[in-house]
Image: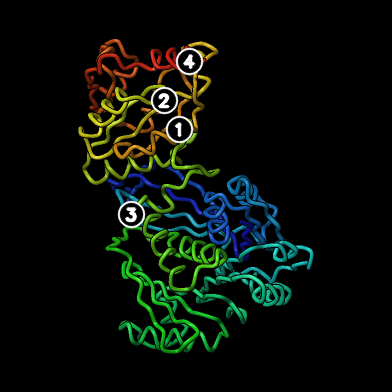
Amino acid sequence: MKIAVVGDTLLDIDLTGHADRLCPDAPAPVLEVDRRLERAGGAGLVATLLADDGHEVELITALSDDDASARLRALLGPVRVHAAELGGPTPVKMRLTASGQRIARVDEGCAMPPFPVVEPGLLAALESADAIVVADYGRRFTSVATVRAALERAAKRVPVVWDPHPRGTRPTAGAAAVTPNLSELLTFSGREVDEPGAVAVAGDRLRQRWGAQAVVVTLGERGALVCGPDGDTHVAVPSAGLRIEDPCGAGDRFASSLAVALAQGEPLRSATEAAVATSAAFLAAGGVSALRVGGGAGFGTAADAASSDSPAVALARRIRATGGTVVAAGGCFDLLHAGHLHLLEAARALGDCLIVCLNSDDSIRRLKGPQRPVMNEHDRAELLMGLSCVDAVEIFTEDTPEEVLKALRPHVWVKGADYRPDELPETKHLRSWGGEVVTVPLQPGRSTTGLAAAIASLG
């Protein structure tokens, strides 16, 4: 599906670590940074999420000719960027977090820029889009007359989902859904809207004021409230007990998912339910902190792990932060068999998550010869992710998993009993951070080599 994303793009940087001392010259904490994560923010985050979902994404925005903009273009990967001249520095927002607690945010280049000059040709991608998401972050892009006129025309043909901002411009008429959160609804309506009935009244008034087909108010852990075309149809959609620790990116995930569901022909209510479910899963998996730069299908690579961008590294960090036990197991897993399943189930029982460190295709060829692997690394990773005992997969390209283990820092490293812990090169690393190596007895008669030979004999 082809999705166009329109709006303001910025560079988001997360610095996370620990703070156990104060500055000598002021009562301010000193953050020892363990991790730096850069990602596209604003409309760029919406585009990233949709590209990760496998959609063809066109981002229509304004950027500057500076270092932050160059980094943004690299982070956006497969997204096709159509950018007007911003007329000021690319905005950068840096969040500082110590031991899970946000301690500061630093903004650079966030002063209000002049109105960008948007040539009509820049908006051509709207004409072939199956759906459009407008991510208004209050930086004037959606105030440009040519942009607004193009969006109004597009709304007559495809769903336009508009995620508004208190400092932004009013949505264009005909939007399929406008998605303020509760705080934004309060700002837009100028009244208290804590109770569901008041939320519904305020949402419906805004729907009429904006000329939108619907207003869908996101309510965090309470889900969303749909204010549809009929004034008396207000449907509360529960979020199945979601607990939100860091809501960053939740609104972007909701708006992008809602647009896709509407483009697929889903009615407003079921589309909203799907968007709530997708947003809940996104937050439960770690939200923006678990995003892997460049996309992916639930597993990462050694390069990702080294830069702390992979889902596996984010999962390990979350489990450690809550006092849980991180377990890792490694191998080629070429042609899964019952022996593999036994080992992985035993490994998962030792802790609170299991991360499989998977040899890449090149690594296996060096270890086992040019005829292996039988299955490529992506197929092997997908099969492993299909097992209920596996929580994440990390692909490594080296001959041994030492580097990926340094990034994951598991408490337990599991191998088959055909290995002796003291002979493994990774054992010294496990012990350096207090981890241990555990061996699991092998299942007699189960081996990939034997299975591969049996399959070859059939030919």
Say which residue label 3 marks: 28
Say which residue label 2 marks: 403
- Mark 4, Cα crowd under 10 Å, few <14 / some 14-19 / many 20+, is few
Residue 306: numbered disc: 1
Compared to residue 271, the image places residue 235 above or below, namely below
Q: Is residue 304 left or right of residue 171?
A: left
Question: Residue 285, position in %: x, y?
Answer: 37, 50
Question: Residue 221, position in %: x, y?
Answer: 31, 67
Q: Amino acid at mark 2?
A: Glu
- Label 2: state its secondary structure: helix
Question: Residue 73, position in %: x, y?
Answer: 64, 49
- Mark 1, Cα crowd under 10 Å, few <14 / some 14-19 / many 20+, is some
Quarter location, residue 408: top left
User: Upstream in the sequence, badge 3 or badge 1?
Assistant: 3
Question: Residue 411, position in %: x, y?
Answer: 25, 31
Q: Amino acid at mark 1?
A: Ala
- Label 4: state its secondary structure: helix
